[in-house]
Amino acid sequence: MPIIEVKNLSKHFGAIAAIRDVSFEVEEGTIFGFLGPNGAGKTTTINILCTLINPTSGSAAIAGYDCTEDSSIVRKSIGIVFQDTTLDRDLTAYENLMLHAYLYNLKKSEMKDRIHDALHFVGLYDRKDDTIKKFSGGMKRRLEVARSMIHRPRILFLDEPTLGLDPQTRANLWEYIVDLPKKHNVTIFMTTHYMDEAEVCDRIAIIDRGSIIAGGTPEELKKTVGGDVIHIKTSDNTRARDELEQHFSLEVSEENGELYFTSSRGDACIPEIIQTLGKTVHSVRLQRPTLNDVFLNMTGKKIRDEKMSSSDTLKEDVRAYRRRFGRS
Amino acid sequence: MVEVNAIYVLVARELIKFFRERARLVSTLARPVIWLFLVGGGMSRLVTPGEGVSYMQFIFPGILGMTILFSSIFSSISIIWDKEFGLMKEILVAPVSRLSIVIGKALSGTIVSSIQSTIILMLFPLLGIKMGALSILYVLAIAFLLSFTISSLGIIIATFYESFESFSAIMNFIVMPMFFLSGAMYPVNKLPEILKYISQINPLTYGIDALKHAMFQSSSMVDFSLITDLFVLSVLSMIFVTIASFIFERKK
Ligand SMILES: Nc1ncnc2c1ncn2[C@@H]1O[C@H](COP(=O)(O)OP(=O)(O)OP(=O)(O)O)[C@@H](O)[C@H]1O
Ligand SMILES: [Mg+2]
């Protein structure tokens, strides 16, 4: 039996349909990635699964228990790292973990060890008596991941766990996270904007504007792109483009003075192309498809567009504002 | 179902924060002291309640009520801060009954408020009020009960607001009217008819009345019987706690 079962789930906020008819399943002990651009409905789905809000229609169940009807049973088996910090900034790191341990009714004899282990694990033991006010964004994130595992949940929800972290901290955190399923036999449900991070997932679902538009293993999804992407630079791009389209009946696009197209026979077609185009070729580059290409292919846009729409910028501003002043 | 551990840790959290923030302690204690000596001192030239009781003595139960009102409400509406800064989500996803969360929050406010009113109560010799050990205990017990009632009311108020911009609205439209229509500064039976009616649905009225019972022997100072006061406060507490946990139970 799958540990998470979501069937025809919809949630409306007034006139806005945050998610529409979403269905998926997650097997126990796997890492499941939920990918999508801003406002796609990722957080809304997590909020329903972790019993914070009720769906408008459809059902969500965890380990066979309905998230709406049996919320108190569901709460016992889940751990969550929310998108925005949920630490008490006036308490110390240690006190925050204590608060958690008491809320989850841990045995007194276990509390200290678990908390000490957790602090050591994320390398914050020597900062345990500092209040959260004095923590950087990365330290808070690490502490929250540690906190979410203290009560040994069966399922861990991570809503953009590495948002706003530097590459090194991100790498460290992932090292810790990918070990969890084997170490504690926990199932992970995560969302992320960073496509390279999604490579660690066993299965992925891509959600856009409230609906799931694709699902599968990272490999399966990459196959849907239709092969490798080949980039070519020539001295006369217009002519080269015509010839490629005629001889190989390919669909060729141009970006930054470079031609590119997808080919199912990747490396094998490179010699033929060079033969056809002759000396005009400056360089040829072959790229295996990434999840970013999958996303581009499915939605027609990059998951993290350089230019954010104004409402997204606003959202980022609000988050930055909260980070700066909210917890000062 | 009530989880003792969760209630304990919610109260402990509030106390840690309370003692860590000395400024809050000073500022919440300063308000009643200023009212007592500046307003009370000034008004005592104009008003004489009679029966050998000075105006400063007359308003002392009201000043205790004010201490309780402000610190209980302030403590409970910190829930709005918790929503804003996210900690409320951590509490709401925990496997803890919503009743325990409400009781934990209400007790947090009650204990903080009781500590503050105890400090204010110790001013009584300065005002020439005579109280024996037993009366002091009565006063403290009533202060505890009243703090619980007001704290649980504060939780209900907090559930209606999402951000702390609403703080001044709560202060101006709920807290200040509750204070002035409670018999703290003037006897309820001297109010105009309509205001008298409002004051009778104000829990603070009964709390301050009970404090007057415990502090003064003279019966002309009070509006209701002590039994009525205690009964109203206890029943209201239960109603408020029930409503609050019901609101918490209901999800968006
Ligand atoms: N409480 C709410 N009230 C009204 N609308 C909401 C609420 N929560 C979410 N929405 C709307 O639902 C949609 C999905 O939001 P959601 O937070 O689930 O997106 P997301 O995929 O998590 O995005 P992001 O990557 O920016 O975190 C958005 O259009 C959002 O404006
Ligand atoms: Mg989100």
Image (cartoon, coloured by chain):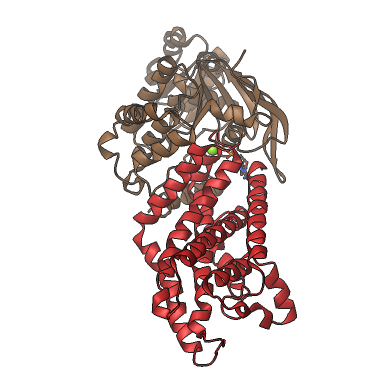
Chain colours: A brown, B red
User: Quick one: which residue is furthest to the top in this view?
Assistant: A268
Q: Is residue A223 above or below residue B203?
A: above
- Residue drawn at x 31%, y 47% is A134
Q: Is residue A324 visible?
A: no
| Nearest the eye: B152 or A234 | B152
Quarter the C terminus of chain A occupies = bottom left
Q: Is residue B239 visible?
A: yes
Quarter the N terminus of chain A occupies = top right
Q: Quadrant of residue A44?
A: top right
| Nearest the eye: B98 or A247 | B98
Q: How many numbered dots are placed on residues in this image?
A: 0
Position in image of residue B245 (x %, y %): 63, 45
Position in image of residue B124 (x %, y %): 42, 74
State which image quarter holds ligand 1: top right
| Nearest the eye: A184 or A324 | A184
Q: Is residue A94 above or below residue A63?
A: below
Q: In this view, does B223 lie above or below B203?
A: below
User: Quick one: which residue is furthest to the bottom in this view?
Assistant: B46
| Nearest the eye: A255 or B238 | B238
- Residue drawn at x 35%, y 54% is B20
Position in image of residue B164 (x %, y %): 52, 59
- Residue drawn at x 42%, y 47% is B13
